[in-house]
Amino acid sequence: MQERTLSIIKPDGVARGLIGDVVKRLEQAGLRIKGMKMIRMSKEQAKGFYKVHEGKPFYESLTDFMSSGPCVVMVLEGENAIEKYRKLMGATNYEEAEEGTIRKEFASDIEKNVVHGSDARETADFEIRYFFSELDIVSY
Ligand code: UDP
Ligand code: MG
């Protein structure tokens, strides 16, 4: 089933020069990049994006971090794209992530874990619309 998911290279990933490494893995996995831009979220935008986590102990720190510098946001498309990309990312906590995953390879902090990926159809839809209009998504 063709589906879309939202990927973010978080501020730590951009600052550490990991854009190329992440993009290379997406391309090699056959995930098509159909939208891509660099953004800098305000604190309010970060809070809206992570609204599902409102009230959790890490919410304030996470939204400070996500608005602390530029991110690269991408719309990925492909067969089973949501699960495929979650597998490439690895577990939220890098210590529990499988060998070879982006987080295992590059992260060393549970918060600053290099990448974001949508976790279901409904969240992917919300998250893509949060950053992209349909006109920004290229068909090819
Ligand atoms: N996070 C954190 N501490 C936690 C859990 C999550 O700092 O105990 C951060 C981390 O950056 C994570 C983000 O909050 O990527 C969103 O959490 P979620 O559980 O949705 O993890 P993800 O879907 O990113 O794997
Ligand atoms: Mg999540």
Image (tube, helix red, strand yellow):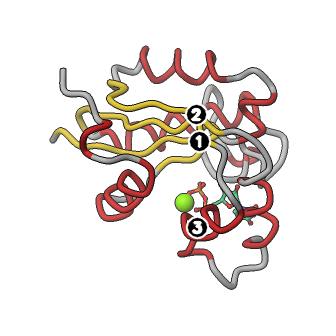
Q: Position of residue 57 (x, y in %)?
A: 78, 78
**Could you tell me which secondary element the residue under label 1 belongs to?**
loop
Q: Which mark is residue 90?
A: 1
Q: Nearer the viewer, mark 1 or mark 2?
A: 2
Q: Are marks 1 and 3 in contact (CB under 8 Å)?
A: no
Three-letter amino acid code of the residue under disc 1: Gly
User: Cβ of disc 3 within 8 Å of ligand 1?
Assistant: yes
Three-letter amino acid code of the residue under disc 2: Met
Q: Position of residue 36 (x, y in %)?
A: 45, 30
Determine the image quadrant of residue 21: top right
Count of numbered circles on the image:
3
Q: Are marks 1 and 2 in contact (CB under 8 Å)?
A: no
Give the distance between the C-alpha atoms of the residues marked 1 and 3, in whole angstroms. Answer: 19 Å
In the picture provided, is 3 more to the left or to the right than 60? left
User: Cβ of disc 2 within 8 Å of ligand 1?
Assistant: no
Residue, disc 2: 38
Residue at horizontal 78 percent and vertical 38 percent from the top: 12
Instruction: Work out which quarter of the rendered image holds the C terminus and state it.
Output: top left
Q: Quadrant of ligand 1?
A: bottom right
Q: Nearer the viewer, mark 2 or mark 3?
A: 2
Determine whether 63 is above or below 114 in the image: below
Residue at horizontal 48 percent and vertical 44 percent from the top: 86
Residue 4 vs residue 79, the one in the foreground: 4
Residue, disc 3: 50
Labels 2 and 3: the sequence-earlier one: 2
Residue at horizontal 78 percent and vertical 72 percent from the top: 60
